[in-house]
C-alpha cells in the first residue's frame, strides 16, 4: 500500500498543459526533473518511454517519473492530452516525487466524477480570476488522489525502494542505446548530453558509476566492434570503414583500432581466425 508522508504530501502544481497532437506530429525526446502525469482525453496515441512503445487509448493515464526519457507521436488522427507537472510529494519508503508503479501506463475507465474533475480543471485554467490558483491546487490534488486509488484498486506492481538507483540504470542504458544506434555519427560529449537533455558533467558521472567507463570510451569500443565486423566482410576499404563507424580521418581510426585491439586493421584482416569463409 502506498502511504503518503503527511508532512511532505502537499503537491505543488508546476504546470497544466492541455495539448493536441495532429497526425504526423511528434514531440522531441525529453525528460522532466519532476513527475509528469498525462491523461489521454482523446486517443489513440503512441508513447515511447525508455525506448519502449506503448499504444495508449482514451482514458489511459501515463505516469512519467523524474528523468524518464519519452516522447509522443501521432500516426492516426488528432489526440488530446492533459499534462500535469507535479512537485513536492512523497510516499513512505520511496524517493521524493515518485509514483512507484512498474508500468508507466494505467488502463482505466474513469468515473463520472473523474471526468467532471478534468472538465472543471480545464475550465478553471481558461480564464484568470480570483482564487484560481487555489482552485487548481484543490482540483489537481483531488485528481491525484483518484489516480492513486486506481493504482491501489488494480493492485499494480510497484518498484522496490531503490527507485532512484533504478532510474539511473535506465538513463545509463538509454545512453548506451543511443551510442550503439548512432555510432556512425559525429558525437561529442556535448552533443550526446544535449540529446539526453542532461548536463555533460552529470551524464559522465552517472554513466561511469553505472558502467565503469566514460561515454566516449564506450562509443569507441562500439565503433571498434563494428569495424571488426566490417573488416571481416572484406567488402570495404579501411578508409570506407573508418567513415562508416564515425571517423573521417582513416589514420586516426587506424591508431585507435590498434590501441584497442593490439593490431592494425590490415593485420586484423590477415589473422587466420578473422578471414571470411567463402
Image (cartoon, rainbow, N blue to C red):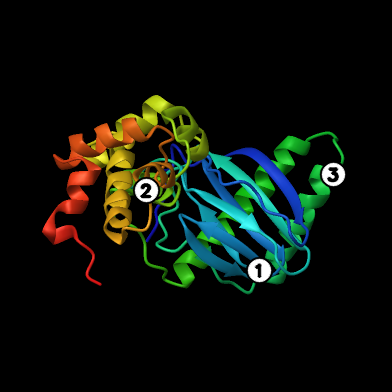
Position of the N terminus, as image quadrant, is: bottom left
Q: Earlier in the sequence, mark 3 or mark 2?
A: 3
Label 3: few (<14), some or many (≥20) within 10 Å?
Answer: few
Neighbour tally class for label 2: few under 14, some 14-19, many 20 plus, Cα within 10 Å: few
In front: 18, or 189? 189
Question: Quick one: label 1, few (<14), some, or many (20+) residues within 10 Å?
Answer: some
Q: CA distance from mark 3 to mark 2?
A: 63 Å
Labels 1 and 3: the sequence-earlier one:
1
Badge 1 is on which residue? 59
Displayed quadrant of residue 13: top right
Q: Is residue 176 above or below residue 251?
A: below
Is 120 left, or right, of 228 in this rendering? right
Q: For numbered disc 1, what is the local secondary structure? A: loop
Is 4 placed above or below 7 here? below
Residue 245 is situated, as x and y percent measured from the top left of the image, at 39, 45
Secondary structure category for the residue under label 2: loop
**Which is closer to the viewer, label 3 or label 2?**
2
Residue 260 visible to the viewer? yes
Dot label at residue 31: none
Q: Position of residue 68 (x, y in %)?
A: 47, 48
Instruction: Report the front residue among 275 and 187.
Output: 275
Residue 67: image x %, image y %?
A: 46, 43
Q: Quadrant of the C terminus?
A: bottom left
Residue 237 shows which numbered tag?
2
The residue indicated by pointer 3 is 126
Amino acid at each position: 500500500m502506498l502511504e503518503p508522508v503527511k508532512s511532505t504530501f502537499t503537491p505543488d502544481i508546476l504546470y497544466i498543459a492541455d495539448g493536441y497532437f495532429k497526425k504526423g506530429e511528434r514531440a522531441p525526446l525529453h525528460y522532466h526533473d519532476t513527475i509528469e502525469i498525462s491523461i489521454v482525453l482523446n486517443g489513440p496515441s503512441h508513447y515511447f518511454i525508455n525506448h519502449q512503445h506503448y499504444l495508449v487509448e482514451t482514458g489511459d493515464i501515463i505516469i512519467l517519473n523524474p528523468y524518464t526519457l519519452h516522447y509522443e507521436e501521432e500516426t492516426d488522427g488528432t489526440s488530446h492530452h492533459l499534462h500535469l507537472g507535479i512537485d513536492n510529494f512523497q510516499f513512505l519508503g520511496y524517493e521524493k516525487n515518485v509514483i512507484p508503479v512498474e508500468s508507466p501506463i494505467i488502463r482505466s475507465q474513469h468515473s463520472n466524477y473523474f471526468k467532471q474533475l478534468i472538465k472543471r480543471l480545464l475550465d478553471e485554467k481558461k480564464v484568470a480570476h480570483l482564487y484560481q490558483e487555489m482552485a487548481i491546487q484543490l482540483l489537481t490534488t483531488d485528481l491525484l488522489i483518484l489516480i492513486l486509488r486506481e493504482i491501489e484498486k488494480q493492485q499494480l506492481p510497484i518498484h522496490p525502494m531503490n527507485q532512484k538507483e533504478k532510474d539511473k540504470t535506465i538513463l545509463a542504458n538509454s545512453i548506451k542505446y543511443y551510442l550503439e544506434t548512432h555510432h556512425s555519427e559525429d558525437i561529442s560529449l556535448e552533443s550526446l548530453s544535449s540529446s539526453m537533455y542532461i548536463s555533460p558533467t552529470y551524464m559522465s558521472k552517472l554513466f561511469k558509476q553505472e558502467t565503469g567507463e566514460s561515454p566516449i570510451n564506450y562509443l569507441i569500443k562500439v565503433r571498434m566492434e563494428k569495424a571488426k565486423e566490417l573488416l571481416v566482410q572484406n567488402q570495404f576499404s579501411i578508409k570506407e570503414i573508418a567513415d562508416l563507424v564515425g571517423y573521417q580521418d582513416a589514420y586516426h581510426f587506424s591508431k585507435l583500432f590498434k590501441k584497442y585491439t593490439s593490431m592494425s586493421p590490415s593485420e586484423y584482416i590477415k589473422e587466420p581466425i578473422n578471414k571470411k569463409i567463402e
